[in-house]
């Protein structure tokens, strides 16, 4: 009898802790969406649709490709050298922004204080490719033509470098929305 009560209480505590953790994560995301720094990344061309997952756009960013070239050059320079370090599997990059919040350049974070017009963004390496930002954007069925015009991704970025994609933008920087 005592063991059954103990197990019930233990189960209740685990459920409450899990719910608290999920709610805390949701709260953090909401704060990023409200207060995060706006960063606009230019999109790089990729395959725009997947029939298995419905209508979505696979995303890649010009800035990520620039950083990938930097990693490839470093790997090339390190070949055969003993004290050469490979880039970390995940970390942060310092993104330089222009006056319109467009990302114009990025370097790997070296733990230096940020200057005005700079923001940290998280990255990760997977399958020898550098990923920043969100890798895909799902939209309503039948909206593919509208979203095919996307040229930029608009993010809200938290102080810790977490980036949340909020909108896709067209060539003029206008947010793309679903049909009126």
Image (tube, rainbow, N blue to C red):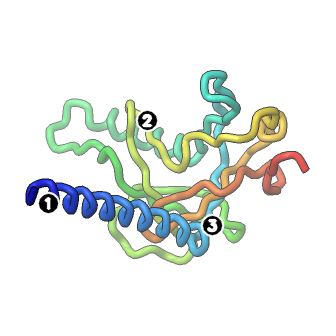
Q: Nearer the viewer, residue 14 or 103?
A: 14
Q: Image quadrant of residue 47? A: top right
**Contact check, label 1 and label 3, Cβ < 8 Å:** no
**Nearer the N terminus, badge 2 or badge 3?**
3
Q: Nearer the viewer, mark 1 or mark 3?
A: 1
Q: Estimate the x, y position of residue 30 in percent, counting from the top left.
A: 55, 68
**Contact check, label 2 and label 3, Cβ < 8 Å:** no
Locate residue 114 relative to residue 105 in the image: left or right.
Answer: left
Where disc 2 sits, the SS reads strand
Provide the residue designation for mark 2. 129
Provide the residue designation for mark 3. 38
Whole-number angstrom distance, CA of label 2 to CA of label 3: 25 Å
Locate residue 39 relative to residue 122 in the image: left or right.
Answer: right
Which quadrant: the N terminus?
Answer: bottom left
Location of residue 41 with respect to 74 vertically, above or below: below
Where disc 1 sits, the SS reads helix
Locate residue 14 relative to residue 6 in the image: left or right.
Answer: right
Location of residue 129 with respect to 97 vertically, above or below: above
Binning the other alpha carbons within 10 Å of mark 2 as few (below 14), some (14 to 19) or many (20 upward) gives some
Provide the residue designation for mark 1. 6
């Amino acid at each position: 009898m005592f063991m059954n009560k103990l197990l019930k209480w233990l189960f209740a505590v685990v459920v409450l802790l899990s719910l608290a953790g999920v709610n805390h994560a949701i709260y953090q995301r909401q704060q990023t969406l409200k207060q995060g720094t706006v960063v606009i990344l230019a999109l790089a061309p990729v395959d725009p649709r997947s029939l298995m997952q419905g209508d979505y756009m696979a995303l890649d960013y010009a800035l990520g490709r620039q950083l990938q070239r930097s990693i490839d050059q470093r790997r090339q320079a390190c070949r055969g050298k003993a004290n050469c370090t490979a880039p970390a599997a995940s970390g942060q990059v310092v993104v330089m922004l222009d006056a319109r919040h467009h990302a114009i350049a990025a370097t790997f974070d070296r733990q230096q204080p940020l200057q005005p017009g700079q923001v940290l963004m998280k990255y990760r390496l997977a399958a020898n490719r550098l990923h920043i930002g969100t890798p895909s954007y799902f939209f309503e069925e039948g909206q593919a033509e509208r979203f095919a015009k996307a040229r930029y991704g608009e993010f809200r970025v938290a102080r810790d470098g977490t980036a949340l994609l909020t909108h896709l933008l067209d060539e003029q920087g206008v947010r793309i929305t679903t049909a009126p």
